[in-house]
């Protein structure tokens, strides 16, 4: 290309396009770049390969070739090392991935299948394994152990068999009678059955409706479960040990200005229990609190909300009903309390004062009736500071479902009619009530 042609083409290029063609490195104009290229392209040589080459391109190609030849031994060594290392690295990577997967799978398997079916349930469950029973038969016994409708001791039969096979303990499982519990893991259960330990002794005890924390402590000492009731009473008074496990207890422990002698009063549900002979105070209390949580269902909670009561208010009312009435009068006594609360009257229940004074009798003197305490409803309107006993299911239901006819008829009084049966007589007015007291007092 001649200089005239370059000049001609440059004349046809817009000014902006010409500026954009300046090299950012050399800042040479297009004409100078073209001249340089023409000079280089004009020099043609015959290369070692027998082919004609442009001199500039050929020199660059020769240099690259020389560098490749100089680096060839180094590349060969690297390739040789890599050919040896790559399988090892691939193996290590595969092993690391496998270890991670196995660890994750093992952790999931342990949580899902080997942990206790009920970590908070230490109830003893007796299982008898007949002689000659294999792992499959034992797994079936453990899976079906317990009362109807209850969880077994393991969550999966197949997993139990796989576990004992994997641990090599299938041949070590021993026949016999074992006392196990749902708060045991599969490993603990297998270890016990393999060692053939004799079953631990258990103790049954019954908490009846209306018992207080203190009378429950006495009962536990009588059965031989506790040497003395001091620690049991201390745990019941504070309640903090159980706050994180039971939301209804946590609410009580967080309340300010509580004047209750025992935070757990009202929540140790009356029932018959069986525990290991060496059960701790915490284990015994946990069983009773768990049972309370089972009984106080969502239906009860919804009904309490409908009435405008908290759970604690329901239990306080139920504890008073439990102390004041026999079962057949529960709903009527509940109606009397409901009517008096609605009328902003004192509840006038001697049972709450007796809870503090511990007289053992509802026949209180005039001086005792004036005793200043938040458990003395005749002096303070509303409910007492806390429950006065541990009520059963019937009393709780009565607190939630008082006799509707007695509410409609406006009954606000009752007194004992027959000491032998515990039957009560009810009145709408104070005059009727005073007449009933005069009539039936000789029976007391």
Image (cartoon, rainbow, N blue to C red):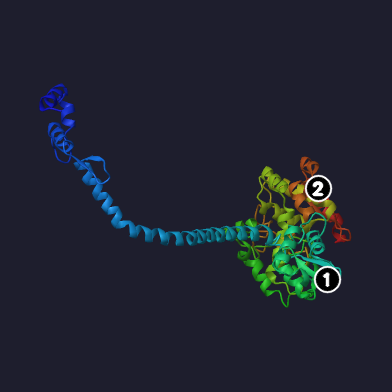
> In the image shown, does 294 or 270 lie closer to the viewer?
294
Q: How far across and how far down the image is residue 17, in percent?
A: 18, 27
Quarter of the image for the N terminus: give it: top left
- Does residue 246 appear to the left or right of 57 in the view shown? right
Q: Which residue is mark 2?
A: 427
Q: Is residue 181 left or right of residue 46?
A: right
- Residue at 67 percent across and 62 percent down: it is 264
- Indicate which label's residue lies in the foreground, 2 or 1: 1
Q: Sequence order check: which comes first, mark 2 or mark 1?
A: 1
Instruction: Identify the secondary structure beneath mark 2.
Output: strand
Q: Relative to 282, does residue 387 appear above or below in the rendering?
A: above
Residue 80 location (% of width, % of height) = 41, 60
Tell me the CA gap for discs 2 and 1: 59 Å
Tag 1: Cα neighbours inside 10 Å, few (<14), some, or many (≥20)? some
Instruction: Report which quarter residue 391 is drawn in.
Output: bottom right
Residue placed furthest toward the front: 50
Q: Is residue 211 left or right of residue 377?
A: right
Q: Is residue 177 visible?
A: yes
To which quarter of the image does residue 302 belong? top right
Kindly identify which residue carries mark 1.
177
> Residue 85: which quarter of the image?
bottom left
The answer to the question of whether label 2 and label 1 lie on touching residues, with beta carbons closer than 8 A, is no
Residue 241 is marked as none
């Amino acid at each position: 290309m001649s200089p005239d042609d370059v000049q001609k083409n440059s004349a046809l290029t817009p000014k902006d396009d010409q500026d954009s063609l300046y090299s950012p490195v050399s800042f040479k104009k297009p004409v100078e770049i073209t001249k340089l290229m023409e000079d280089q392209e004009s020099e043609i040589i015959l290369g070692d390969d027998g082919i004609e080459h442009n001199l500039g391109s050929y020199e660059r190609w020769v240099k690259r070739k020389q560098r490749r030849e100089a680096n060839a031994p180094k590349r060969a060594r690297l390739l040789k090392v890599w050919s040896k290392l790559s399988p090892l690295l691939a193996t290590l990577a595969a092993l690391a991935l496998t270890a991670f997967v196995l660890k994750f799978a093992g952790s999931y398997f342990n949580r899902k299948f080997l942990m206790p079916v009920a970590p908070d349930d230490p109830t003893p469950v007796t299982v008898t394994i007949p002689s000659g029973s294999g792992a499959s038969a034992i797994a079936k016994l453990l899976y079906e152990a317990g009362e109807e409708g209850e969880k077994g001791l393991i969550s999966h039969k197949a997993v139990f068999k796989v576990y004992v096979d994997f641990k090599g303990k299938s041949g070590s499982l021993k026949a016999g009678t074992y006392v196990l519990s749902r708060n045991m893991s599969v490993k603990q259960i297998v270890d016990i059955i393999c060692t053939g330990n004799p079953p631990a002794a258990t103790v049954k005890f019954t908490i009846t409706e209306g018992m207080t924390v203190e009378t429950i402590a006495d009962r536990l000492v009588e059965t031989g479960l506790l040497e003395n009731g001091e620690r049991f009473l201390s745990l019941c008074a504070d309640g903090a040990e159980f706050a994180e496990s039971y939301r209804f207890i946590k609410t009580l422990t967080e309340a300010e200005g509580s004047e209750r002698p025992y935070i757990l009063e009202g929540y140790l549900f009356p029932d018959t229990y069986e525990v290991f002979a060496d059960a701790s105070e915490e284990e015994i209390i946990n069983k009773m609190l768990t049972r309370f949580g089972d009984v106080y269902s969502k239906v009860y909670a919804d009904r309490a909300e409908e009435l405008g009561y908290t759970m604690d208010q329901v239990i306080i009312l139920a504890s008073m009903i439990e102390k004041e009435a026999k079962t057949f009068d529960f709903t009527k006594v509940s109606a009397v309390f409901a009517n008096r609360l609605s009328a902003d009257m004192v509840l006038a229940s001697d049972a709450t004062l007796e809870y503090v004074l511990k007289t053992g009798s509802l026949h209180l003197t005039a001086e005792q009736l004036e005793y200043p305490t938040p458990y003395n409803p005749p002096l303070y309107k509303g409910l007492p500071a806390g429950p006065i006993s541990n009520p059963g299911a019937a009393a709780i239901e009565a607190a939630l479902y008082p006799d509707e006819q007695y509410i409609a008829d406006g009954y606000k009084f009752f007194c004992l009619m027959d000491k032998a049966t515990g039957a009560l007589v009810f009145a709408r007015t104070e005059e009727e009530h005073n007449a009933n007291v005069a009539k039936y007092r000789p029976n007391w």
